[in-house]
Amino acid sequence: MFGGQTEFLNRREAGQRLAAELAHLKEEQPVVLALPRGGVPVGFEVAKALSAPLDLLMVRKLGAPGHSELGIGAVVDGSDPQLVLNDEAMEIIRPSSDYVREEMERQLAEIDRRRAAYFAEHDPTPVSGRTVILVDDGIATGGTVRVALKALRRSNAARIVLAVPVAPRDTLDALHDDADEVVCLATPPNFRAVGLHYENFSQTSDAEVIACLKAAREWLSSSD
C-alpha cells in the first residue's frame, strides 16, 4: 500500500497504475468485480492486465417501510445474491420478515434490470473458490464497499482483494478486516472527495460501462 498525494489523469490511467500493483495476483486467475459505474473503467484496465474476467457487483439499498431513503440493509448481486442487514436499524425499525423479503425482491429485480441493460444475457460470474478483486474508482466513507465485501465473504470467495486508486487512511483501516488484502495507490492526509484526485472525473455513462464490458470479454477470448 502506498501513501502520499497522487493525481490521476482519468479512471483508465488510474486503472493501469492499479493493475501494476496487482500483477502478483495474475497467476491466481482472479475475477475482477467493478462497482458501477465509476469503477468499471478502472476495473477494465485491471482485468485486461491480469487476463481476468470483468464483471459488475451491484449493491442496492433496502429502504425502511415508508422511508425509502433510510437503509435497513442492502442486497448484493451475484450468482448467489447476498442480503446484508443493518442490525442497528433493524432493531430500531423492526420491519416484518415479509417486508424485508419483498423489499429484497424489489431491489433484486432492479439489479436484474440493470444487469440486463449492461450485460444482455450474461449471468453473474461465480466467485466461490476464486480470488476476487473488488475495484472502484475511489472510496470516501466506505459504506457501499463494506457491504460488498461482507457479501463476497458469504459467497465463499477464496480470497478477497480490495483495490482502489485513492481513499482516506481511516476508511481503509476500517475495511481491513473485511478483505484479505487492500491495495490503494494514494491515501491523502486531507482527503475531501474522490473526484478531487482526478484531472478528469466526468460521470461514467451507461454506454461506457457497456463498451468496457464488451471489450473485456473480447480481450479475454482473444487471449485464450
Image (cartoon, rainbow, N blue to C red):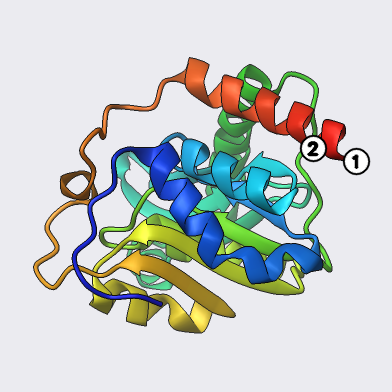
Q: Is residue 18 above or below residue 43?
A: below
Q: Residue at x 27, y 27 (%)?
A: 202
Instruction: Tell me residue 10's x, y (percent).
Output: 33, 37
Amino acid found under the numbered disc labelled 1: Asp
Q: Quadrant of the N terminus?
A: bottom left
Instruction: Tell me residue 27's x, y (percent).
Output: 79, 67
Q: Residue at x 48, y 44 (%)?
A: 42
Kindly indicate whether the residue at mark 1 contacts the one at mark 2 (C-beta within 8 angstroms).
yes
Q: In front: 166, or 147?
A: 166
Instruction: Tell me residue 20's x, y (percent).
Output: 54, 60
Q: In front: 20, or 124?
A: 20
Q: In screen coordinates, is 181 left or right of 24?
A: left
Q: In front: 107, or 223?
A: 223
Amino acid found under the numbered disc labelled 2: Leu
Q: In screen coordinates, is 199 left or right of 181?
A: left
Q: In screen coordinates, is 42 left or right of 33?
A: left
Q: In front: 43, or 63?
A: 43
Determine crowd level at label 1: few under 14, some 14-19, many 20+ residues with C-alpha closer than 10 A.
Answer: few
The mark total stands at: 2
Q: In screen coordinates, is 46 left or right of 51?
A: left
Q: Residue at x 63, y 38 (%)?
A: 105
The quarter of the displayed image where residue 125 is located: top right
Q: Gap between marks 2 and 1, in whole Å?
A: 6 Å
Q: Is residue 203 above or below residue 142?
A: above
Instruction: Tell me residue 94's x, y (percent).
Output: 42, 62
Give the structural element (helix, strand or loop) at label 1. Answer: loop
Q: Which mark is residue 224?
A: 1
- What residue did someone put label 2 on? 220
Give the structural element (helix, strand or loop) at label 2. Answer: helix
The quarter of the displayed image where residue 82 is located: bottom right
User: Is residue 59 at least partly visible in the picture?
Assistant: yes
User: Is residue 136 at least partly visible in the picture?
Assistant: no
